[in-house]
Image (tube, rainbow, N blue to C red):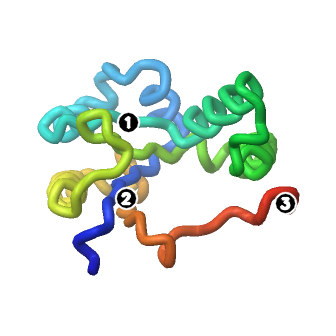
Amino acid sequence: MSGQWKYQVRVYLNGDLAEAARFNPGSEKLERLSDVLAKHGAELRCQFDLFAAYVAEAERCGTENYHLYEWTKATIEDPAKRAKHLKVFSLHVNDEEIYAKDIADALESDLMPLVDGTLIEKLSKHDSNPANTLQPPARGQK
């Protein structure tokens, strides 16, 4: 059954590196990480920026069709959650947000040596199984 799920790898960076990853991904500070990402056709995508883009799109197109709008907007407006999500980067592989397990496993394996608290603080792998995914509250709840 697990073969049906797709996966996503996320990295957690410290403040300086997170800022570089958002605004200067070619920075020398990120060279070791960039080399691994290039090998896998992967790119860093800041969770906060993804959330903010979702909120902006919902507001532009009409929030009634965006069932995560209220939850996402509340998340990016909360100072503690904002600070947290500015350090979290999902890895998109070949422009895909989620991908096959073997791709996620290979990426995770190559990134593990960089999890040293200075380059990558933490690494996580998530699957698309709804039973393993944090579900936002129902619409209208916070």
Amino acid beneath label 3 = Lys
Q: Is residue 19 above or below residue 137?
A: above
At label 3, counting other C-alpha atoms closer than 10 Å, the crowd grade (few under 14, some 14-19, many 20 or more) is few
Q: Give the x, y percent position of residue 9.
A: 34, 54
Q: Residue furthest toward the front? A: 65
Residue in front for this viewpoint, 129 or 14? 129
Residue of label 1: 44
Q: Is residue 42 left or right of residue 122?
A: left
Amino acid beneath label 2 = Leu
Say what secondary structure mark 2 lies in. strand
The N terminus appears in which quarter of the rendering? bottom left
The tag on residue 89 is: none
Amino acid beneath label 1 = Leu
Q: CA distance from mark 2 to mark 3?
A: 28 Å
Q: Give the x, y percent position of residue 21.
A: 43, 30
- Mark positioned earlier in the residue sequence (2 or 3): 2
User: Which quarter of the figure has residue 129?
Assistant: bottom left
Say what secondary structure mark 3 lies in. loop
Q: Give the x, y percent position of residue 85.
A: 60, 46
Q: Residue at x 40, y 52 (%)?
A: 10
Q: Residue at x 34, y 51 (%)?
A: 98
Residue of label 3: 142
Q: CA distance from mark 2 to mark 1?
A: 13 Å
Residue of label 2: 123
